[in-house]
Image (tube, coloured by chain):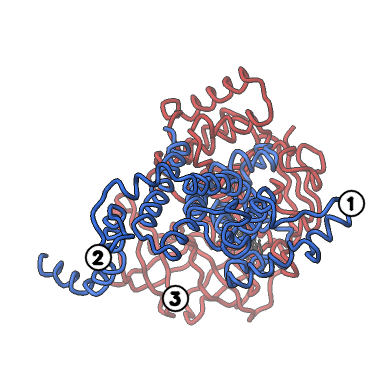
Chain colours: A blue, B red
């Protein structure tokens, strides 16, 4: 038995080695770096330096606020939208199902830069199609990039566009694993399609929905691409700066690794805390 | 009155026709079993009655009312699925009451119906459990309970026992029989197990490849099959089929000679026209219709391969001189010890080359 375990570990060794070096070590290392003052040479141990700054930094609280705001609005809207898309995809009435499935999944594989460029074009003040459409139905143009509220909305729209289809496909897979005859039984039980959705589909899909929520929460907590590329580094004036962006700014522009590590740990802690609360709220009640 | 009438019912999936014009007349309170091999269209027929499949042609009436275009929920039927189809996230109690709760049935009435169903099926002590914490037999009871709660005029069962082990199957069979007596409702029951059909049914509908081969009471099918298929399908072990040829006619009927055995001749009275001399036929003999030498029309020497002892009776698996396999039923006390034995044919059935019964 012991011998066989040893053999197994020898096979696992290359993986474990790489895993330790590139995964475990950075986690530990950045934790230690967050306790060091990194603007001095050599770095010195100063526990209060970064963490103390964090508690009083308005830029940090601005980033937390922006991130949480996006999280609270965008994630539920996106999951609800994904659910609607999944229901439509699952409908036997739908023609050309494969095409839709591809279309829903496509945003995920489109390059981030290309997608951001297209969004900037679509939402541009004077020749963007979105403002043209708004105009054509008699609404005023919106300057998406110069005001904080429209800029935040734009980020949420972009993130939703990119990830709703992905979540819809996951939800669809969950829906298709619910046996057809359960619905047939409900139909014979005189239960309407709408009630079947709320009393059968939703409860049976709960684990999948929770999975999508957790994925989305973690993703949004790390949100970077959209505020970096679409609203140009968290503009206007830091109005869309997220934690991910703050981390990048501190770590790679100001080369303040200690502070960036402290921000990173805060992001992770927040993601874990929110996920735990959410798991607790949706737990299986016996 | 919950009669169920199928007239020329046809089902097509695309261009592929799977039920070719079924005519069945089911009386109020009758227990009718659809039986046939896998893929013959039993479930499809049942699901058309339930309204879960569209009807491609013909008419279905329940209680004298045409239901072709009536929603499944309004047909006054309840169905028990092979997979049970219980709501996995609900307790037994919620499973039973779900339909009634969703349609705004008064709570007191719902509670009464659920309580009664639970008592009938003896599942009262399981009411708080989820389906996954129930045994197969218990799940089956809950599935039946869900049907009872609806107080339907017609119960539909699609192979409800096929997921249970042999012992439980026998026990549930008895329960379903009891239920039928207790509720007095019309029941239509699908199975591919002829024993289940024989023991449960008032009448059996034998299906093959989308055609109805015969409809009749269990013993009528057993004693008087219309064709080779029904003869072979009903009864266990199967009826033996031996190739033969018409060799003449005498005062008592046609004379048949078993293939390759000039001395074994059977005389069979026929009401209808006798086939020509020389035409090929098939003689069917049930295992219990072989007697000891001299007891019947003719004697036949067979070589015994295997003897199966079941206690009271035994089955001899043997071969005729012409090489055809036969199964012979014997009292345990009369099992021969020799490797060859002479048996007589006490009763036989005659089928023409197309498999239709000659009588
Ligand atoms: N949705 C469908 N689309 C196409 N063909 C189907 C469909 N449902 C059933 N069939 C075909 O119809 C025929 C009858 O099927 P059905 O399920 O009624 O058989 P069955 O007698 O219930 O068999 P079993 O004993 O295996 O349950 C089969 O050939 C099957 O392949
Ligand atoms: Mg079937």
Q: Which residue is drawn at 69% across and 62% down?
A: B211
Outermost residue on the front side: it is A40
Task: Give the CA distance from mark 1 to mark 3.
Answer: 90 Å
Mark 1 residue CB less than 8 A from any atom of ligand 1: no
Give coordinates of residue A62: x percent, y percent.
52, 46
Give coordinates of residue A101: x percent, y percent.
64, 65
Instruction: Give the residue at mark 1.
Output: A138
Instruction: Give the residue at mark 2.
Output: B337
SS at circle 1: loop
Q: Can residue B322 be seen in this view?
A: yes
Neighbour tally class for label 3: few under 14, some 14-19, many 20 plus, Cα within 10 Å:
some
Nearer to the camera, A15 or B347: A15
Mark 1 on the same chain as mark 3: no
Q: Which of marks 1 and 2 is in front?
A: 1
Nearer to the camera, B313 or A255: A255
Q: Residue at x 28, y 55 (%)?
A: A36
Task: Give the CA distance from mark 1 to mark 2.
Answer: 103 Å
SS at circle 2: loop
Question: Are the two marked residues, 3 and 2, in contact with CB atoms closer than 8 angstroms?
Answer: no
Give coordinates of residue B62: x percent, y percent.
76, 40
Instruction: Give the residue at mark 3.
Output: B324
Q: Which residue is drawn at 84% across and 61% down?
A: A132
Q: Is residue B197 visible?
A: no
Q: In which quarter of the image is residue A2?
A: bottom left
Question: Are the two marked residues, 1 and 3, in contact with CB atoms closer than 8 angstroms?
Answer: no
In the displayed structure image, the side of residue B38 where residue A196 appears, left or right: right
Neighbour tally class for label 2: few under 14, some 14-19, many 20 plus, Cα within 10 Å:
few
SS at circle 3: loop
> Chain letter of disc 2?
B
Nearer to the camera, B201 or B176: B176
In the displayed structure image, the side of residue A121 where residue A58 appears, left or right: left
Mark 3 on the same chain as mark 2: yes
């Amino acid at each position: 038995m012991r011998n066989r375990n040893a053999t197994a570990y020898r096979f696992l060794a290359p993986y474990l080695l790489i895993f330790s070096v590139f995964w475990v070590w950075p986690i530990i290392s950045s934790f230690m770096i967050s306790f060091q003052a990194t603007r001095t040479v050599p770095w010195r141990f100063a526990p209060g330096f970064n963490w103390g700054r964090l508690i009083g930094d308005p830029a940090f609280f601005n980033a937390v606020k922006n991130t949480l705001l996006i999280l609270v609005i965008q994630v539920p809207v996106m999951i609800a939208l994904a659910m609607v898309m999944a229901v439509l995809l699952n409908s036997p009435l739908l023609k050309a199902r494969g095409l839709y499935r591809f279309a829903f999944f496509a945003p995920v594989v489109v390059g981030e830069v290309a997608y951001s460029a297209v969004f900037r074009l679509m939402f541009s003040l004077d020749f963007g199609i979105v403002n043209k459409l708004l105009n054509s139905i008699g609404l005023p143009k919106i300057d998406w990039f110069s005001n904080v509220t429209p800029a935040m909305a734009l980020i949420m729209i972009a993130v939703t566009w990119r990830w709703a289809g992905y979540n819809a496909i996951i939800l669809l897979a969950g829906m298709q694993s619910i046996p057809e005859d359960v619905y047939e039984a409900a139909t014979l039980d005189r239960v309407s399609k709408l009630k079947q959705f709320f009393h059968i589909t939703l409860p049976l899909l709960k684990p999948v929905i929770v999975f999508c929520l957790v994925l989305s929460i973690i993703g949004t907590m790390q949100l970077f691409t959209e505020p970096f590329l679409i609203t140009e580094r968290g503009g206007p004036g830091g109005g869309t700066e997220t934690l991910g962006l703050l981390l990048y700014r501190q770590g790679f522009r100001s080369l303040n690794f200690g502070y960036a590590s402290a921000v990173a740990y805060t992001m992770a802690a927040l993601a874990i805390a929110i996920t735990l609360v959410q798991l607790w709220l949706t737990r299986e009640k016996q | 009155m919950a009669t169920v009438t199928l007239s020329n019912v046809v089902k097509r999936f695309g261009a592929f026709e799977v039920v070719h014009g079924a005519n069945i007349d089911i009386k109020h309170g009758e227990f009718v079993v659809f039986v046939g091999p896998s893929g013959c269209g039993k479930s499809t027929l049942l699901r058309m009655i339930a309204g879960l499949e569209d009807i491609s042609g013909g008419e279905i009436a329940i209680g004298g009312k045409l239901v072709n275009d009536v929603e499944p929920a309004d047909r006054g039927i309840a169905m028990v699925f092979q997979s049970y189809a219980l709501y996995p996230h609900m307790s037994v109690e919620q499973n039973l009451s779900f339909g009634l709760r969703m349609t705004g049935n008064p709570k007191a009435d719902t509670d009464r119906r659920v309580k009664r169903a639970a008592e009938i099926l003896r599942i009262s002590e399981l009411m708080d459990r989820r389906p996954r914490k129930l045994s197969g037999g218990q799940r089956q009871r809950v599935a039946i309970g869900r049907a009872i709660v609806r107080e339907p005029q017609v119960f539909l069962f699609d192979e409800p026992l096929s997921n249970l082990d042999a012992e439980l199957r026998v026990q549930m069979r008895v329960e379903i029989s009891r239920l039928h007596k207790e509720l007095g409702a019309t029941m239509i029951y699908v199975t591919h197990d002829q024993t289940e059909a024989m023991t449960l049914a008032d009448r059996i509908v034998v299906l093959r490849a989308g055609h109805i081969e015969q409809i009749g009471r269990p013993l009528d099918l057993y004693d008087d099959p219309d064709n080779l298929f029904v003869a072979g399908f009903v009864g266990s072990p199967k009826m033996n089929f031996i190739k033969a040829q018409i060799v003449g006619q005498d005062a008592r009927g046609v004379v048949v000679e078993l293939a390759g055995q000039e001395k074994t001749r059977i005389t069979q009275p026929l009401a209808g026209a006798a086939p020509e001399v020389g035409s090929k036929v098939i003689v069917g003999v049930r295992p219990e219709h072989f007697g000891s030498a001299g007891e019947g029309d003719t004697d036949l020497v067979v070589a015994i391969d295997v003897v199966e002892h079941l206690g009271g009776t035994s089955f001899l698996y043997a071969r005729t001189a012409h090489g055809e396999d036969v199964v012979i039923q014997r009292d345990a006390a009369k099992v021969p010890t020799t490797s060859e034995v002479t048996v007589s044919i006490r009763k036989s059935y005659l089928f023409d080359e197309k498999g239709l019964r000659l009588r």
